[in-house]
Image: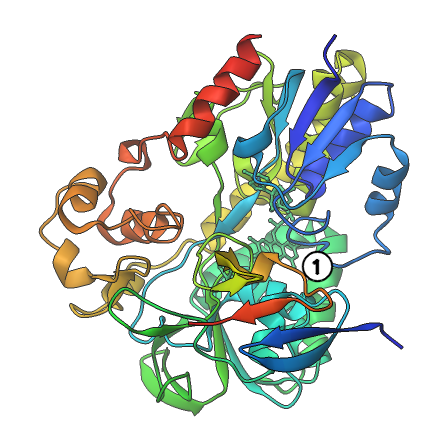
Amino acid sequence: MRRWDVVVVGAGPAGIAAACGAAESGARVLVLDDNPAAGGQIWRNDAAQPWLERFAESGAELRTGCVATDTLPEARSYVLATGARELFVPFPGWTLPGAFGLGGMQALVKSGLEVAGKRVVVAGSGPLLLAVASLLRKRGAAVAAVVEQAGRTAMAEFGVRLLMEPEKLGQGAGLMMSLWGVPFYTGSWVESAMGRGRVERVRMRCGGRVVEQDCDAVAVGYGLLPNTELAALLGCHLAEGTVVVDEWQETSVDGVYAAGEVTGIGGVEKSLVEGEIAGLAAAGLQGQAQRLFAKRAKTHSFADGLARAFAPRAELRKLAQTDTLVCRCEDVTRGALEGMKSWREAKLQTRCGMGPCQGRVCGGATRFLFGWGADSMRPPVFPVKVESLIETRQS
Amino acid sequence: MNRRVTVIVDGRPLQVDVGTTVAAALWNAGVTAFRHSVTGEERAPLCGMGICFECRVTIDGVEHCRSCQTLCADGMQVKTS
Ligand SMILES: Cc1cc2nc3c(=O)[nH]c(=O)nc-3n(C[C@H](O)[C@H](O)[C@H](O)COP(=O)(O)OP(=O)(O)OC[C@H]3O[C@@H](n4cnc5c(N)ncnc54)[C@H](O)[C@@H]3O)c2cc1C
Ligand code: FES
């Protein structure tokens, strides 16, 4: 007899909701996560989160600190809730110590990185910008500037959409208030970071002007990209960098479901409701799952607005200079990649994407810079482990 | 009061709160060169979530551990490069 009915990969909001949905109906559920604790990106070290409490009581078993490809055990169905990572757009100086990702800096601060008294420039795009700036300020940092690449008009349109969801508008307004007095630039971006051995200063392009700012750190992130590697390994159909699912959140592979950021970037509410649907459907409770369809549809319309308002602008493609590194594992410059026709050719000719991160950073960057298709980024990512995975599924 | 643990970083003992990742502890202690890149550049954490591998250090003799995914534990030996 199989030990598990449902194995969930990822213990972020989507995975937790899926696990609760399935386990509370009596299914035997195992949840795997790479992080040291459950919570995903948003509830990192947040023990008071009601969903985490519910999860702890659901009867689902949690295994942290493991990458799922290593250990995916036999089960009737799987829920992939692998979340998202940041889109990093290379710029001169982004490899200097003290140049962090945006969510990256947030994650590090939540896991103990001290910022009290430090001057930090917060830049990039999307709702995460304000959330991170606000967290940094709460922890005592001097937020020197918040730099949003989206223009005022796009932001305003997004604001109008928010008016239809007063709860979110309230959150945004609260964040703005917590950042009272911090310079907030729209239609602006960080052009370069400079310093000896670490970041000491950034140069920003603010509405046509160049502004220089001394700082101890800079946090830059241009939105999120779904973590589709595991889904790709399992043979799930992908489109435009997201995992394709049907109304039950089931992928093109029978018995493999996907939920949350991995099916398209849309924030925590989308992850939760998709997770619940996936968990219920994976446990065979289609009737209950169906009742959540309307709620899900609302989160999808929010996600569309998000994507439109904060789409990264073309100027960002010009930030990386000929000698700027694009692949940080193999130290491949933009110049070395310029003549290449595809991701595949770049890998073979320059080793771009062949290092330990396996293209998780430069894959997104080169797709943005050169338009290289995600589909030419071929699995397997961890060849040996795939076999054991497939064997597991067939037995 | 938070409980504290002691980790040894390049031979130097360091007291940190329980729940601190090795990456955060190193940065707080002033470490900026977690590792050296293939062309010799000094590198420090970028993503904070286990995907970029820039925060790699040697932990208890095991090379290439991602310090952002590892919690500090009492007596842990950490070596940067
Ligand atoms: C760095 C970062 C910071 C963010 N901060 C915020 C914020 O402050 N507020 C906000 O509203 N939204 C934030 N977001 C957006 C966030 O993605 C959503 O709000 C929400 O957390 C998404 O939930 P999820 O369950 O879909 O994915 P996630 O929360 O990303 O959870 C996915 C989980 O899967 C695990 N995982 C992935 N692949 C594997 C694997 N192969 N094996 C094992 N485990 C794996 C990851 O470790 C992670 O814990 C952030 C996103 C990122 C990338
Ligand atoms: S900082 Fe990116 S893997 Fe640790």
Say whether residue A72 is visible: yes
On screen, residue A38 above or below A279: below
Front-most of residues B16 and A295: B16
On screen, residue A285 above or below A339: above
* Quarter assignment of residue A337: bottom left
How crowded is the residue under tag 1: few (<14 C-alpha within 10 Å), some, or many (20+)? some
**What color scheme is it?**
rainbow
Q: What kind of residue is marked 1?
A: Leu
**Quadrant showing the N terminus of chain A:** top right
Q: Is residue A235 left or right of residue B26?
A: left
Residue at left 61%, top 19%? A247
Front-most of residues A292 and B29: B29
How far across and down, in percent of the image, does residue A324 sit?
23, 69
Q: Is residue A171 left or right of residue A263?
A: right
Chain of residue at mark 1:
A
How far across and down, in percent of the image, does residue A381 sit?
39, 35
